Image: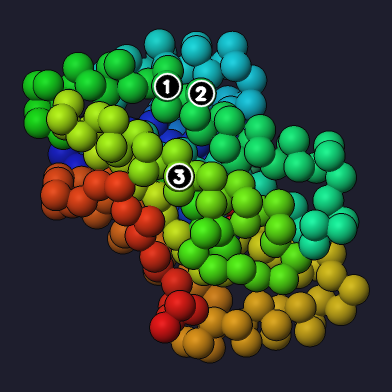
Amino acid sequence: MRLAGKTILITAAGQGIGRASAIACAAEGARVFATDLNADLLAGLKGIETWPFDVTDAEAVARTASRVGRLDGLFNCAGFVPHGTILDVTDADWEFSFNLNVTSMMRLTRACLPAMIERAAETGTASILNMASVASSVKGFPNRAAYGATKAAVIGLTKGIAADFVRQGIRANALCPATVDTPSLRGRIAAAADPVQAEKDFIARQPMGRLAAVEDIVPMVVYLLSDESRFVSGQAVLVDGGVTI
Ligand code: NAD
């Protein structure tokens, strides 16, 4: 099994990419701690340790880091998609988005890193995976001004962590999917003025002619958390269905 003997913490594991990642990592032999803001969403994750966790709550971040102890893998998956151009963004939306998508990731990584460094001293490597997006410094998309800014920041943060701790066995990579069919995407489609057209528009911008399924993304999550990727660090890894061809 590809993750045998590893302990991995995942945020936003209640649904979407985070949930599918928790299931896949457990199936590959990892001890998985699956957390999410919404405790109800975690209820169906059998054989996986779960607890409710708001990543924007600084005290909860400290409690979670001490609860998990030594970690081989941290998947910071939590994120939110603010919609609109820069003319639509309020200061409050901007702050909320950076707080959830970037600051919480920095805090949780900072809290978990000392124990990950200890673990890497024993095993040779520990892996941090930060959820970015192809909508970031990689590529601009309409109505993603604040979102793209947060995900570009994730890539910069990830590269900084990778550079600072490479000698201590820590690897850090950012994952950049294109549009994935998840509950929050369905919510964004449903909230559009014309949901049928909105879904067509999401599909039209993906050259492969379809939305990604979570199963298209999760193999890269497992790879980046496993020792198979032991020579990979500081990368923005695209799983984008050809969006950037
Ligand atoms: P989703 O948006 O459907 O679900 C997000 C989960 O995050 C929910 O279970 C929610 O309860 C949880 N959450 C929300 N706020 C939280 C908080 N403060 N603390 C802890 N958990 C919280 O899932 P998704 O679409 O798979 O998105 C997951 C990540 O992937 C996000 O960072 C998103 O930006 C990124 N992403 C998604 C897509 C896509 O098209 N779906 C594409 C690229 C990147």
Tag 2 residue = 107
Mark 1 and mark 3: Cα distance apart in space: 15 Å
Tag 1 residue = 110
Mark 2 and mark 1: Cα distance apart in space: 5 Å
**What's the amino acid at mark 3?**
Gly
- Cβ atoms under marks 2 and 1 closer than 8 Å: yes
* Residue shown at the point (47%, 25%) measured from the top left: 108
Check disc 3 and report its element: helix, strand or loop.
Answer: helix
The quarter of the image holding the C terminus is bottom left
**24 is higher (above) or lower (below) than 177:** above
Mark 1 beta carbon near ligand 1 (under 8 Å): no
Check disc 1 and report its element: helix, strand or loop.
Answer: helix
- In primary-sequence order, the first of circles 1 and 3 is 1
Tell us which disc is closer to us: 3 or 2.
Answer: 3
Tell us which disc is closer to us: 1 or 3.
Answer: 3
Q: Specify whether 202 is left or right of 177.
A: right
Mark 3 beta carbon near ligand 1 (under 8 Å): no
* Residue shown at the point (24%, 54%) measured from the top left: 223
Q: Residue 16 in the image: x percent, y percent?
A: 54, 54
* Residue shown at the point (87%, 45%) measured from the top left: 90
Tag 3 residue = 156
Q: Residue 88 in the image: x percent, y percent?
A: 87, 56
Q: Specify whether 193 is left or right of 51.
A: right
Depth check: give the residue in front, 62 or 24: 62
